[in-house]
Amino acid sequence: MHPISHRKHKPIHFLHNPEPDSLPQDVESFLRHLGGPTLIIIDGQDNSRCRGIATLLHGNEPSGVKALLAWLRSGQTPAVRVICLIASVQAALHETLFYYRMIPGQRDMNRCFRPPFDDHQGHIAEHFMMLLDQYRPEALLDIHNTSGMSPSFGVVTYLSPEHDHLVSLFTQRIIVTELRLGALMELSTPDYPIVTIECGGSDQPEADQTAIDGLHSYLFREQVLHSEGTNELDLYRHAVRFELVDDCHIAFADQPVAGADLTVPFDVEKFNFGVIPALTRLGWLGPRGLSIFRVCSAGGENVLPHFLLARSSGLYSAQRLKLFMVTTNPAIALSDCLLYACAETEHIRPPA
Ligand SMILES: [Zn+2]
């Protein structure tokens, strides 16, 4: 034994240019083959450049890893070197395949890209950040699925033509967020675009197709930061999160549930990326009223009254809103948020 060695074990394994035929066709077997967080490195036509992909940060969001596996098995050489992080392999395999966002008791992997890095998820994040410094990709995609049914969209922390072009490889909806939660895309700078791609719900076949098509463009195009045409993107900005207090009792049902602090009808998902007018009913409140909600601006100011109001135990929109990432999963509603809302939208046309 070597008791004097305190060198920290690096959590991410490496797989260089795997032989396409050696990879299992089935995604579960592929994940078992990887066994843990893995960086796959594939040489391209031009290895002086590199592009990055991260996926499966959330263990229940398979579209990205399924698309990656299909490409890896095809053996097609990408335009430039590609590094792919497949992160929460253990969470994806925990008990039921693609069931857990993270292993119960562990932190959300996509909230760990800022200090402290002192647990397993933090070590993975820190190691990946080191690898990004080493490989210096010209762009990085982080591919997710939404927790409910949803159309596809991209999320960015900066608005720039490069960020727009990356998102437009996958989808025409783009969300600019000022919120800082420790997500991977927050490492982005104006010169180093990192975008989050939400392909849609994990049960939706079109989400898998979005991942396949977008990935194909990202892998094989000579340029991914400049447009090959004109894209009109549907822009959402200044989004806020409808968070719930920890001890909130939330129910999903089509009529108010006795004893619940909040009852949300299942069909609230139909509002995803739709515009709702003021005074649209979003659910029913219990005796604690609106006090179960936390709705803050990026600056931390309480902006709840701008977004929500209560009328005789009904929960209503306080103004015309666009909603997205609406979930009907109570665990996600409580641990993350019920939905995101914007009070404005506009169209942008990136320069050709
Ligand atoms: Zn996710």
Image (spheres, rainbow, N blue to C red):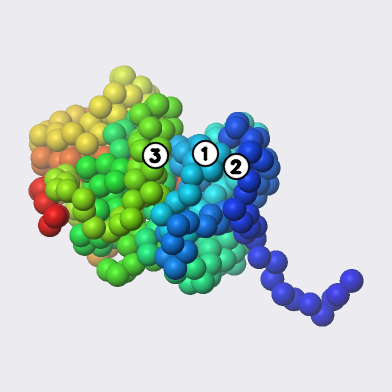
Mark 1 Cα shell of 10 Å, populated few (<14), some (14-19), many (≥20):
few
Q: Is mark 3 within 8 Å of ligand 1?
A: no
Please say if 335 is above or below 138: above
* Mark with earlier residue (1, 2): 2
Q: On the image, numbered disc 2 is attached to which residue?
A: 20
Decide: marks 3, 2 in contact (CB < 8 A)?
no
Mark 3 Cα shell of 10 Å, populated few (<14), some (14-19), many (≥20):
many
Amino acid type assigned to the residue bearing label 3 in the image: Ala
* Mark with earlier residue (3, 1): 1
* Mark with earlier residue (3, 2): 2
Q: Which mark is residue 74?
A: 1
SS state under label 3: helix
Q: Nearer the viewer, residue 205 or 112?
A: 205
Residue 37 point in image, percent of width and height: 61, 53
Amino acid type assigned to the residue bearing label 2 in the image: Pro
Q: Quadrant of the C terminus?
A: bottom left
